[in-house]
Amino acid sequence: MEAIALSEEKLVNEENQLRQYKFATTYYDEELKIAGVKWHGSFATDDYIELFNQFIKDVKGKEIIGFYSDIREQGVVPVAARKHFEKVFSPKGKEIGIDKTGVVTDASPFKKYYLNTLIKVTKRPAKLCSNPEEALEFILS
């Protein structure tokens, strides 16, 4: 594969957009084989669950090697939503090919705790990154 100039815009753009919600937008790039979500607000547990259920349907049959999540503008994740992610989405993510996860975060203490908990539960390579390019490079490495 020839070198790809990595920037957030390579994944996060209108052409790659799968769904847009009030609180997040999901994406998939066929060349990178990366799917992801960019969060931009607060949400209820049901909204979070619906996003991931729809995401699984939207990427079914696509080749995916990694997951990108930009949580810098994400609201607080309700406990029930986090537990659903651990029990349902994480195993489904593995089934569809997600191996590595790159997370862009501002590293607030609450988010860092939440993320480290998820990393332990998924038992897959994940990295907390301070910028989108670092997250994409990790997924592709």
Image (spheres, grey):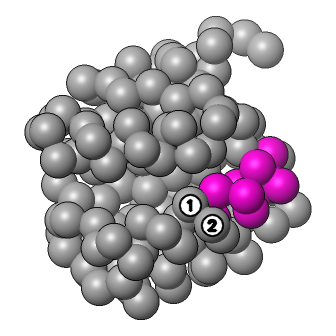
Direction from residue 92 to residue 18 in the image, left or right: left
Q: Quadrant of the C terminus?
A: top right
**Against 38, is 126 above or below?**
above
Q: Is there a contact, CB below 8 Å, between mark 2 and mark 1?
A: yes
The residue depicted at 28 percent of the width and 26 percent of the height is 131
Residue 62, given in percent of the width and then of the height, sits at: 81, 55
Disc sitting over residue 77 in the figure: none
Residue 21, given in percent of the width and then of the height, sits at: 36, 79
The majority secondary structure of the magenta stretch comes to helix
Q: Residues within 10 Å of mark 2 (few under 14, many from 20)?
A: few
Disc sitting over residue 87 in the figure: 2
**Against 26, is 123 above or below?**
above
Element under disc 1: helix
Amino acid under label 1? Glu
Residue span colored magenta:
89-97
Q: Which residue is the site of mark 1?
A: 86
Q: Nearer the viewer, residue 11 or 87?
A: 87
Q: Residues within 10 Å of mark 1 (few under 14, many from 20)?
A: some
Q: Nearer the viewer, residue 122 or 72?
A: 122
The residue depicted at 35 percent of the width and 55 percent of the height is 38
**Against 107, is 1 above or below?**
above
Direction from residue 131 to residue 27 in the image, left or right: right
Q: Quadrant of the N terminus?
A: top right
Q: Nearer the viewer, residue 57 or 100?
A: 100
**Against 63, is 88 above or below?**
below
Residue 17 visible in the current orientation: no
Residues at marks 2 and 1, CA–CA distance in whole angstroms = 4 Å
Residue 112 visible in the current orientation: yes
Residue 15, given in percent of the width and then of the height, sits at: 52, 57
Amino acid under label 2? Lys
Q: Is residue 125 magenta?
A: no
